[in-house]
Image (cartoon, rainbow, N blue to C red):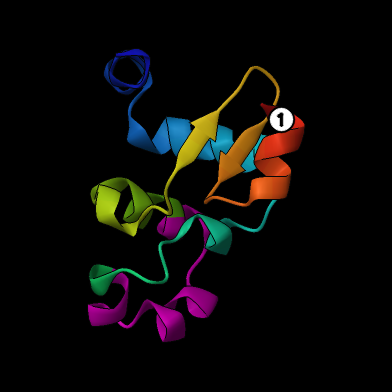
Amino acid sequence: MFTFLLYQAFGKKSILLYCYKMSGLPLKKFFNTSGLLYKSMELKDKLPTMSEEEQLKLLATDGMLVKRPLVIGENFVLIGFKESEWGEKM
């Protein structure tokens, strides 16, 4: 419910930008590189030539491009499941 309200209030792109900035990680870490859509769009070759703005817009177009789980905490963002990171933050 909380995520839905965030989407309604701010939009996908704004939330992704917030998560990206808060995480301190490269934007490419937010892409679901194992996903069929990522592979069919041949993003492995295209992302390096895309601007940050273009990448954010692309991520906001389809949730299947976003690596999951994506957890937004009060002062952290977790992307994907890494047990050691989750143990520290949760």
Does 64 appear above or below 45? above
- In the image, 67 versus 54, the foreground residue is 67
Asked if residue 76 shows in the view, the reply is yes
Query: Residue 3: image x %, image y %?
Result: 36, 21
Q: Residue 22 vs residue 31: left or right?
A: right
The overriding secondary structure of the stretch rendered in magenta is helix
Q: Residue at x 52, y 51 (%)?
A: 80
Is 1 above or below relative to 15? above
- Residue 61 as seen in the image, left or right of residue 82: left
**Foreground pick, 89 / 26:** 89
Residue lying at 31% horizontally and 71% vertically, measured from the top left:
38
Count residues near mark 1 (Cα–Cα under 10 Å), then give few for <14, some for 14-19, many for 20+.
few
- The answer to if 44 sits in the magenta stretch is yes
Q: Quadrant of residue 23?
A: top right
Q: Which residue is drawn at the image coordinates 29% and 14% (left, top)?
A: 1
Q: How many dots with numbers?
A: 1
Q: Is residue 24 visible?
A: no
Q: Quadrant of the C terminus?
A: top right
Q: Which residues, given as a range, are shown in magenta? A: 38-55
SS at badge 1: helix
**Image quarter for residue 40?**
bottom left
Coordinates of residue 88 in the picture (x, y in percent) = 76, 34
- Say if the magenta span includes residue 73: no
Question: x, y percentage for residue 5?
Answer: 31, 13
- Residue in the picture at 52% in, 38% down: 17
Rendered location of residue 26, percent (x, y): 65, 58
Which residue is label 1 attached to? 89
21 sits to left or right of 56? right
Q: Which amino acid does the dot numbered 1 rest on?
A: Lys
Q: Residue furthest toward the right?
A: 88
